[in-house]
Image: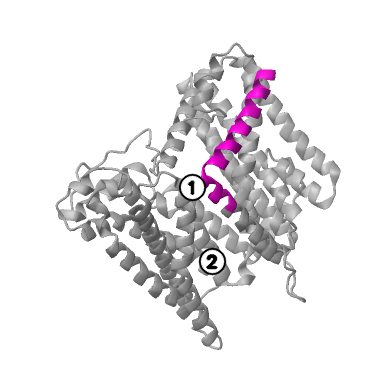
């Protein structure tokens, strides 16, 4: 065990040294730290005097939704590639040492706890609106961060246990997956039925069900809700009960792994290799796509297209073969989260919800097929005008942005009772911001594609987004206050951002069209 303690300390020391000797990484960390301080300081301003805070039970319901979303998404990996707490260095070196397998497992678990805490730091950026709407303190938000880390940890050990059990017995995968889906359906019905019985007060019915005594006995989500709410309200018996359930789950899974699969190295090898490949692709600025295990071949050939438009129809075929629905999994999750948040923010109006959706959209634009196409040689070899090729390569993402906006804002408009014009303006403005974000990604590839420090590129990308979108936001605010007395203020303000974003996005795309002349321009 002393060797593992020494390894942990050496890892931490080397990470600090690497940060100090790499200015780009240091700049990134300082930038993120400055942003966190800015969010905390600006968000700590007390609400306007006389403003009424929303029901705090809504906040606890959102915590429960976040817990179950992250847990089931992580646990589902157990049916495909599993989860791993280790790096390839551990596989190549640590697994070869005569150390106790149980000690190595504990080392991986402790290391993973630190990683999950770091990955949840994005929750800190939600402090401003949570403090304004619910009066949440920074300590309360850090408690949610702890629950988030525990959720990821539970999902990963569950995925690891499932893969260890199913990996050597593939015939068991189908019944287990059917049981997993059935569990999801039953859980969804548990929360949906009260809402269906009281359609006039959907939000209140959902909050009441989340606060029901039976909810605290639900596995993982209910236990973590009891832990969070117990500490939040000072009900220590409830908190201890939730913590006991989580510890019992951990103990059972660890006992099962140690008893049935002492030599678990082979079970986590594939997941470690997949994780290693994804990390390397991210460091190199590449986009790694998870290919489906079973490809639906269907109709063979593109069937349409001539010249540069072939790339658009190629992406259409790839989408048809890789998914059943119009949108990918990430877009569906963003849409579901946005619609759920709109239930809790109905009284705030459509503009705050629109800002929240745009905030989520910022993290999904760079994962489109246009970015993957730049990794392949065909788009560079095609004898077509560069601007036309770039537009056709991005056309599939443009179509996805439009469909995504419709899927998000039509339900939100119905929930809020917004006018059709406001809903259409939100769809259009969402499309404009998505195009601007995609253009900013193209600009980063054109200017800094050969730069190896992807952390520095991230900082520059965020700054570029801020500078490019700020004039449009200022224009929208001016239009809104100029026409505040009219019913068209919101619609025209949103359309003002659309006009600016389309203009800037088209100009950037035109100026960066020579990115397709030479693959070396963007390190491809």
Q: Quadrant of the N terminus?
A: top right
Residue topped by disc 2 = 355
Pointer 1 residue: 455
Q: Main secondary structure of the magenta part?
A: helix
Q: State which region is magenta.
A: 1-30
Say if 443 sits above or below 301 in the image: below
The quarter holding residue 427 reads bottom left
Q: Position of residue 304 (x, y in %)?
A: 18, 53
Residue 209 appears anywhere in the view: no
Question: Residue 386, which numbered label?
Answer: none
**Left-right relation of 359 to 229:** left
Neighbor class of circle 1 (other Cα within 10 Å; few <14, some 14-19, many 20+) is some
- Give whichever of discs 2 and 1 has the lower sequence position: 2
Q: Give residue 461's position: percent from left, percent from top.
A: 45, 56
**Image-based side of 96 in relation to 464, left or right:** right
The residue that appears at 62% across and 71% down in the rendered structure is 348
Q: Nearer the viewer, mark 2 or mark 1?
A: 1
Residue 350 position within the rendered picture, expressed as x and y whole percent measured from the top left: 55, 71
Front residue of this view, candidates 514 and 329 = 514
**Which quarter of the image is occupied by the C terminus?**
top left
* Residue 258 or residue 199, whichever sits in front: 258
Crowding near the residue tagged with mark 2, few <14, some 14–19, many ≥20 C-alpha atoms within 10 Å:
few
Q: Is residue 367 visible?
A: yes
């Amino acid at each position: 065990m002393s060797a593992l303690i020494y390894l942990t300390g050496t890892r931490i020391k080397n990470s600090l040294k690497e940060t100090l000797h790499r200015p780009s990484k240091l700049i990134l960390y300082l930038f993120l730290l400055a942003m966190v301080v800015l969010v905390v300081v600006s968000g700590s301003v007390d609400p306007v005097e006389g403003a009424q805070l929303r029901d705090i039970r809504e906040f606890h319901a959102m915590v429960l939704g976040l817990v179950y979303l992250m847990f089931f998404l992580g646990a589902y990996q157990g049916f495909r590639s599993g989860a791993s707490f280790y790096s390839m260095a551990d596989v190549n070196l640590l697994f070869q040492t005569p150390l106790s397998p149980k000690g190595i497992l504990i080392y991986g678990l402790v290391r993973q706890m630190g990683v999950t805490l770091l990955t949840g730091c994005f929750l800190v950026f939600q402090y401003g609106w949570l403090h304004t709407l619910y009066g949440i303190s920074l300590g309360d938000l850090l408690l949610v961060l702890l629950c988030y880390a525990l959720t990821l940890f539970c999902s990963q050990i569950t995925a690891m246990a499932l893969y260890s059990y199913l990996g050597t017995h593939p015939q068991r995968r189908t019944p287990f997956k059917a049981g997993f889906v059935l569990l999801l359906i039953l859980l969804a019905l548990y929360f949906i039925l009260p809402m269906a019985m009281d359609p006039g007060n959907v939000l209140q019915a959902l909050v009441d069900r989340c606060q029901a005594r039976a909810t605290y006995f639900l596995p993982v989500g209910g236990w973590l809700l009891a832990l969070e709410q117990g500490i939040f309200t000072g009900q220590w018996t409830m908190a201890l009960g939730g913590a006991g359930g989580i510890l019992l789950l951990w103990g059972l899974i660890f006992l099962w792994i140690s008893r049935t699969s002492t030599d678990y190295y082979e079970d986590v090898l594939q997941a470690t290799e997949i994780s290693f490949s994804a990390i390397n692709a991210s460091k190199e600025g590449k986009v790694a796509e998870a290919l489906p295990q079973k490809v639906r071949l269907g109709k063979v050939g593109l069937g349409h297209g001539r010249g540069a438009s072939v790339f658009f129809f190629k992406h259409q075929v790839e989408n048809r073969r890789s998914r059943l629905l119009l949108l990918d999994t990430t877009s569906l999750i963003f849409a579901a989260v946005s619609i759920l948040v709109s239930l809790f923010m109905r009284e705030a109006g459509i503009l705050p919800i629109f800002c929240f959706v745009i905030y989520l959209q910022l993290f999904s634009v760079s994962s489109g097929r246009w970015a993957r196409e730049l990794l392949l040689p065909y788009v560079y070899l095609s004898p077509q005008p560069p601007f036309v090729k770039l537009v056709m390569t991005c056309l599939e993402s443009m179509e996805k942005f439009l469909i995504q906006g419709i899927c998000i804002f039509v339900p939100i408009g119905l929930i809020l009772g917004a006018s059709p014009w406001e809903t259409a303006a939100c769809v259009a403005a969402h499309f404009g911001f998505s195009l601007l974000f995609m253009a900013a990604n193209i600009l980063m590839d054109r200017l800094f594609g050969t730069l190896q420090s992807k952390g520095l590129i991230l900082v520059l990308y965020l700054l570029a987004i801020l500078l490019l979108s700020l004039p449009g936001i200022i224009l929208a605010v001016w239009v809104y206050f100029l026409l505040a007395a009219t019913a068209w203020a919101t619609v025209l303000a949103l359309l003002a951002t659309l006009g600016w974003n389309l203009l800037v996005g088209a100009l950037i795309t035109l100026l960066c069209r020579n990115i397709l002349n030479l693959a070396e321009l963007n390190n491809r």
